[in-house]
Amino acid sequence: MANVIVVALRATLVTLVLTGVAYPLAATGVSQLLFPAKANGSLIKVGGKVVGSELLGQVTTHPAYLQPRPSAAGQNGYDPTASGGSNLGTTSQKLRDRALADVERLLRENPDAPYPVPDELVTASGSGLDPHLSPQAARWQISRVARARQVAPERIRRIVDGLVEGRQLGVLGEARVNVLLVNIALDKQLGKPPAPSSAPDQEQWHTDARK
């Protein structure tokens, strides 16, 4: 019996060292060596300050920026510590009311955009933190962004189209646009916009990264 216990303890110790110490250290070291940016969360910096991650959506309310999909992550949405959906079904009146309110708001804020409103702008992703939109949903917002920035819509379209990401390996997923990367490019190429007259105290996209 004593020999059996000793062998079991040795096997447990070796397994613990290999899988609980050596393997994690090796995997961390290799990832830091080969792709450190991705290994550290795909963080995005502007002026030396972290403003978000390529992997996480964040709230955008300023009309001069692309707005992301709705979010049910956390109490107020876009909470990276509470990823998840609302769990509301297709027959939920609460879900229907929220979606109708979003459609009404989007049509009001985007009077020059074509009808109908893209589905993804009124539906949350399963995680509530999807950082992407389809190119179509991003282009749908161009007229509002151009008006808020007082530039020609073609300038906004060029920025959006220049940041369209194709399918992975040419076959996986769909074409998409990272909302945060587009908003950063808008500021970089066109300068920061003035505060909206209807809500002078509204924060811009980069201040929301503190959440």
Image (cartoon, rainbow, N blue to C red):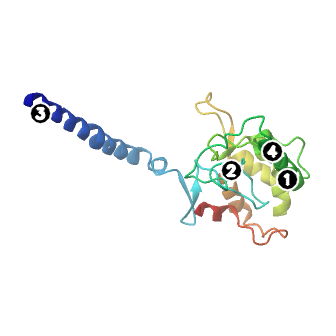
Bin the neighbour count of mark 2 within 10 Å (Cα to Cα): few under 14, some 14-19, many 20 and up.
many
Who's the residue at 91% across and 51% down the image? 112
How crowded pointer 3 is (Cα within 10 Å; few <14, some 14-19, many 20+) is rated as few
Q: Which mark is first along the chain, 2 or 1?
A: 1
| Quarter the C terminus occupies | bottom right
Instruction: Using the numbered discs, state the Cα–Cα distance from disc 1 to disc 3 in whole angstroms.
Output: 69 Å
Question: Mark 1: few, some, or many residues within 10 Å (few <14, many ≥20)?
Answer: few
Q: For the residues carrying marks 4 and 2, which lies nearer the camera in this image?
A: 4
Q: Nearer the viewer, residue 95 or 61?
A: 95
**Which of label 1 and label 3 is nearer to you?**
3
Mark 1 vs 4, N-terminal side: 4
What's the mark number on residue 105? 1
Place of residue 182 in the rendered image (x, y in percent of width and height, measured from the top left): 69, 52
Mark with earlier residue (1, 3): 3
Q: CA distance from mark 1 to mark 2?
A: 19 Å
Residue 174: percent from left, percent from top: 67, 33
Q: Residue drawn at (64%, 32%), measured in percent from left and top?
A: 173
Cα gap from disc 3 to disc 4, whole angstroms = 63 Å
Question: Taking 26 as reference, is 199 left or right?
Answer: right
In which quarter of the view is residue 191 placed? Answer: bottom right
**Residue at mark 4 to residue at mark 2: CA–CA distance:** 21 Å
- Residue occupied by mark 4: 99
Mark nearer the N terminus (3 vs 2): 3
Amino acid at pointer 2? Val
Counting from the top left corner in percent of width and height, residue 29 is at 34, 46
Residue under pointer 3: 6
Residue 89 placement (x, y as % from top left): 72, 36
Residue designated by label 2: 179
Three-letter amino acid code of the residue under disc 3 = Val
